[in-house]
Image (cartoon, rainbow, N blue to C red):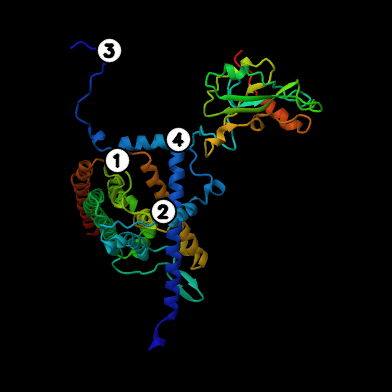
């Protein structure tokens, strides 16, 4: 019969030699191999203590950005919600009152801003759509939760720490923002 | 009448029993840890390292877990036998340690204290008897479970143990012919004077070692526990500490067979090329002897584990063929040759 591929191999059916019948040489060889593995470097990463760096293009959990004075950048324009293919983003707009200038950068802000992490597909289209540099995808993953409710992230969960009160945390969170595909 | 009893010997033996059984239990406990670590290292993994430094508290955590688990006794099982199974396995595993000489005779306040629980003159036969009883633990457990997989596994275990005991016994007869005594202490002292038995009986040792693997139900002969064929083997219906006892008994058996092999073939507590008898009967000499014996046993435990994580399991017919057509004739030939040589040399 014509072979279908060129990888055909004839099976050897010759009787075993005495050394093969004894098993022992083969066993010693195998034990030599396993013993050499005893001293090999382990590829394991001890996870909670040691973490593998994310690639710079990684798209993870969203973060709502603030400006240098700690004011929220989001103006609740809704472009991200429109861009979102999974319809994971909901928001409610509100008008900035006098005396709230240190809280919100522009006259309009998001009173409510929610992302359903069960729907989100981490495509990064919200980041691309945003005209105000307000939303970014970070190099972190959404942690596990016990209920569905816990996966609906509120504005408080998404906001970056305030740079005027907690500079260190702000810088750290800023550092997790990926560079995106260049 | 009461005063005539030598109370010191009773106290002395009680202490010895307590120490030796505790040692065996602790060694078995940490064998589980060692097994997981060695398995991990041989497979380029790290093994348990969460409970305590280097995961050293892992055996304790496992023990607590097993104790806390719900105890289930199947309704259709015969309850007495079901409970007796793991007990018997455990008892027979620890009983073997009674006749093993653990170190040099030491001198405690003018008394000669041998580090051996019972120096019976049929030491080896006693070990064989108790080891053969071990199969009842498996058999009874498998039978009482009223589960066909358990029963199949138990029958396999029984037939495997019986077939390998023959070759084991025959390989031992050769050793006995060399030493000329069944007493364990004599076997060791004979080796300290004439060199270790492994020099005269390499083939006998090989046969004994293979049979010991089979007796302990270790890979490549762990057919009673063949998960892919029998689900879980003879302890399928067991839960909680009863399961723990079965698993524990396996590790004790492994330790004891390591000790027995060191005693029979590797000079027991003897250090090679060193004449410890000249050091006198101090307590520390006994302790060194004990440490040496333990070191030898640990090497065997490592070897057992190393083999387990290297070789796949035998098929059942291969196992039987190896036992009856391979090892048994080989042991017979070994015995005959030894007999002829011993006879010729004695003339």
Position of A175 with respect to B34 (left or right) is right
Count of labels shown?
4
Read off the chain for label 1: B
Percent across and percent down for residue B292 are: 46, 56
Q: In the image, is B61 to the left or to the right of B204?
A: right
Q: Which mark is residue A5?
A: 3
Residue B198 location, x and y as percent? 34, 51
Residue corresponding to mark 4: A37
Q: Does any portion of residue B273 appear in the rendered image? A: no
Q: CA distance from mark 4 to mark 2?
A: 23 Å
CA distance for labels 3 and 2: 54 Å
Q: Which residue is mark 2?
A: B297
Mark 1 burial class by Cα count in 10 Å: few <14, some 14-19, many 20+ = few
Whole-number angstrom distance, CA of label 1 to CA of label 2: 31 Å
- Say whether residue A30 is visible: yes
Q: Mark 4 and mark 2, same subunit?
A: no
In the drawing, does residue B328 fall left or right of residue B245? Answer: left
Packing grade of label 3 (10 A; few <14, some 14-19, many >=20) is: few
Say what secondary structure mark 3 lies in: loop
Name the mark nearer the viewer: 3 or 2: 3
Question: Which callout, 3 or 4, points at the residue further toward the start of the chain?
Answer: 3
Quarter of the image with the C terminus of chain B is bottom left
Secondary structure at numbered mark 4: helix
- Precedes in sequence: disc 1 or disc 2: 1
User: Which residue occupies 60% across, 37% down?
Assistant: A49
Label 1 and label 2 in one chain: yes
Q: Quadrant of residue B67?
A: bottom left
């Amino acid at each position: 019969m014509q072979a279908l591929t060129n990888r055909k191999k004839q099976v050897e059916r010759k009787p075993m030699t005495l050394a093969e019948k004894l098993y022992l040489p083969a066993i010693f060889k195998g034990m030599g191999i396993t013993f050499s593995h005893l001293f090999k470097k382990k590829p394991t990463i001890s996870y909670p203590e040691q973490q593998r760096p994310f690639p710079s293009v990684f798209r993870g959990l969203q973060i709502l950005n603030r400006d240098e004075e700690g004011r929220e950048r989001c103006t609740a324009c809704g472009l991200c919600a429109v861009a979102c293919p999974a319809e994971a983003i909901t928001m409610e707009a509100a008008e900035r009152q006098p005396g709230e200038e240190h809280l919100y950068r522009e006259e309009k802000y998001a009173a409510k801003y929610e992302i359903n992490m069960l729907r989100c597909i981490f495509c990064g289209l919200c980041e691309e759509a945003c005209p105000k540099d307000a939303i970014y995808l970070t190099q972190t993953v959404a942690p596990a939760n016990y209920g569905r409710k816990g996966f609906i992230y509120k504005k408080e969960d998404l906001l970056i720490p305030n740079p005027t009160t907690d500079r260190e945390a702000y810088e750290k969170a800023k550092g997790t923002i990926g560079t995106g595909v260049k | 009448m009461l005063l005539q009893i030598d109370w010191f010997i009773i106290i002395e033996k009680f202490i010895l029993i307590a120490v030796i059984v505790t040692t065996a239990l602790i060694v078995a406990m940490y064998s589980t840890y060692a097994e997981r670590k060695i398995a991990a290292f041989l497979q380029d993994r790290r093994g348990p390292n969460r409970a305590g430094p280097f995961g050293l508290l892992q055996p304790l955590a496992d023990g607590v877990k097993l104790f806390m688990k719900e105890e289930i006794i199947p309704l259709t099982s015969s309850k007495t036998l079901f409970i007796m199974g793991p007990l018997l396995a455990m008892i027979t595993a620890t009983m073997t340690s009674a006749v093993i000489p653990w170190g040099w005779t030491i001198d405690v306040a003018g008394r000669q204290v041998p580090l051996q629980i019972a120096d019976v003159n049929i030491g080896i036969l006693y070990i064989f008897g108790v080891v053969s009883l071990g199969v009842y633990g498996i058999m009874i457990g498998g039978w009482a479970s009223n589960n066909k997989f358990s029963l199949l596994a138990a029958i396999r275990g029984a037939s495997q143990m019986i077939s390998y005991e023959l070759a084991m016994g025959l390989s031992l007869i050769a050793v006995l012919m060399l030493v000329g005594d069944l007493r364990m202490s004599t076997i060791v002292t004979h080796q300290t004077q004439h060199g270790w038995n492994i020099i005269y009986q390499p083939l006998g040792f090989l046969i004994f070692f293979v049979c010991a693997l089979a007796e302990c139900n270790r890979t490549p002969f762990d057919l009673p526990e063949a998960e892919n064929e029998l689900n879980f083997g003879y302890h399928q219906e067991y839960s909680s500490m009863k399961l723990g006892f079965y698993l524990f008994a396996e590790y004790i058996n492994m330790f004891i067979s390591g000790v027995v092999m060191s005693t029979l073939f590797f000079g027991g507590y003897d250090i090679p090329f060193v004449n410890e008898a000249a050091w006198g009967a101090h307590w520390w000499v006994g302790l060194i002897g004990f440490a040496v014996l333990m070191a030898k046993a640990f090497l065997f435990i490592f070897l057992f584990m190393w083999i387990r994580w290297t070789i796949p399991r035998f098929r059942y017919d291969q196992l039987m063929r190896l036992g009856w057509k391979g090892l048994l004739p080989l042991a017979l030939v070994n015995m005959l040759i030894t007999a002829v040589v011993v006879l010729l040399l004695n003339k």
